[in-house]
Amino acid sequence: STLMGLFLYVLISQLKGDFSAQVINMQVAEGDVPFAALFNGCYRKSSNGMQYERRLSYEQVGFEVSGGKFAFCGGMSDTGEKAWVFMVGEDATDPCRDLVARTEATDTYDILEVSNRQWFSREGVAFGNMEVSPVLESSPDCRILDLNRTQKICDQVDLEGYIDRNQREFPLKSFNKTFVNRAGAIVYTYPALTHPIFVESTSTPSSYELIFFTGQSWVLTDILKSKTTGGDVSMQEYMDTEPEFRSILLNIVFNGTNVSLVTDSVAMNTAELSFTPSGLRWFRMREAARNVPYNYPTADQSRPVDEILLSCASCDDNENPCSFGGKCLDDGTCVCLNGGSGTLCKVPPNGDGKCNPYFNNKVYGWDGGDCCGGTCMGPECGLG
């Protein structure tokens, strides 16, 4: 009877999935799946105990209803093969019908046994490995990032040297930091709605440009046009209350629409990079991949845009000082001295036809020759 009891205990535990991983972490390389960052992260066994073919199913932590799901298909409609599958969304209830991706044929009970195996799109296109690993319930890896909005984040970033797709050059564009205050509704723009959004300084609800964090990269949008006429509605009110704004963000994140430039990937737990786009390298967006359901905006490494500079325009005497002797005021702006100009006074005046003694040394090329009458023409040459 003891053996029979032990057998029944093992059988019941197996049927309940007690021997399978309860929490897993899924990571897909950006190069393998263009939309991977939307769903990378932790998955916990279904909250309602849902099983398929006596195997656990898993829901994306924090996005249990509308996020990603792992489940088992007992027989593909076209081949009859069994496989672990990946699904997305509230309406995804049939693993064999609603799959976005699937493993090679397998009959395993534990999803960890298919870790690092080949995965395929719904259309059968191989796209690489989904790395599925076990996670302890107490692991910090499964906590949704909670951004402390009171921490010091650059209030304004300046974009210099930007050239749009029509080859129009913009010497300087300023973007001001803001937050969407009601960050509840849309799952897949969660990072966009909780992280700072930088809005171009001349933007209105009817026409605006953004720099925002998608969850994996920062993107610079084209000029976005809305159906809102503006009137008395401020840009902040539009972002907070208009469903259209969230819909536009969603379209950018899912489909890569209206994306001008995108940075390299940024780990979301790297606070100093995921909370500000300053100092990152920018690229043109990678062309849309075929046979994938989403066109997540990712960087085309073969098309860097190194001529642009995005920097924090808010000065701080300790962390972001004004250059060339400039003075930082309490409001975060610089008073440029000694001839410097531009964001944080970083642009030296070399070769402007005026002698600036501060730059009249070997380091700055003797002010570009401005302090020598033989190499400069102008009424203020050589006066230093």
Image: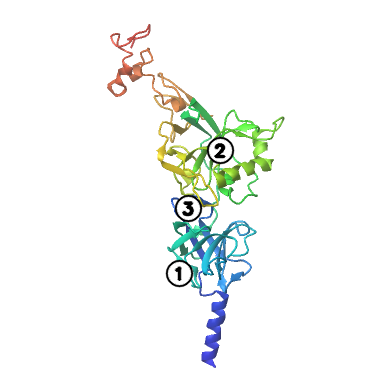
Q: Give the percent coordinates (x, y) of residue 84.
A: 52, 66
Residue type at mark 1 is: Glu
Element under disc 3? loop
Q: CA distance from mark 3 to mark 2?
A: 20 Å
Q: Position of 115 compared to 196: left or right?
A: left
Q: Which type of secondary structure does the marked residue at label 2 adopt? A: loop
Res. 358 image quadrant: top left
Residue beneath the point at 41% across and 31% down? 307
- Residue at numbered disc 3: 33
> In the figure, 337 relative to 279: above or below?
above
x then y, percent, for residue 215: 52, 48
Q: Circles 1 and 3: CB distance less than 8 Å?
A: no
* 383 shown above or below 243: above
Q: Which residue is mark 1?
A: 113
Q: Is residue 378 left or right of residue 14?
A: left
Q: Which residue is mark 2?
A: 258
Amino acid carrying label 3: it is: Val
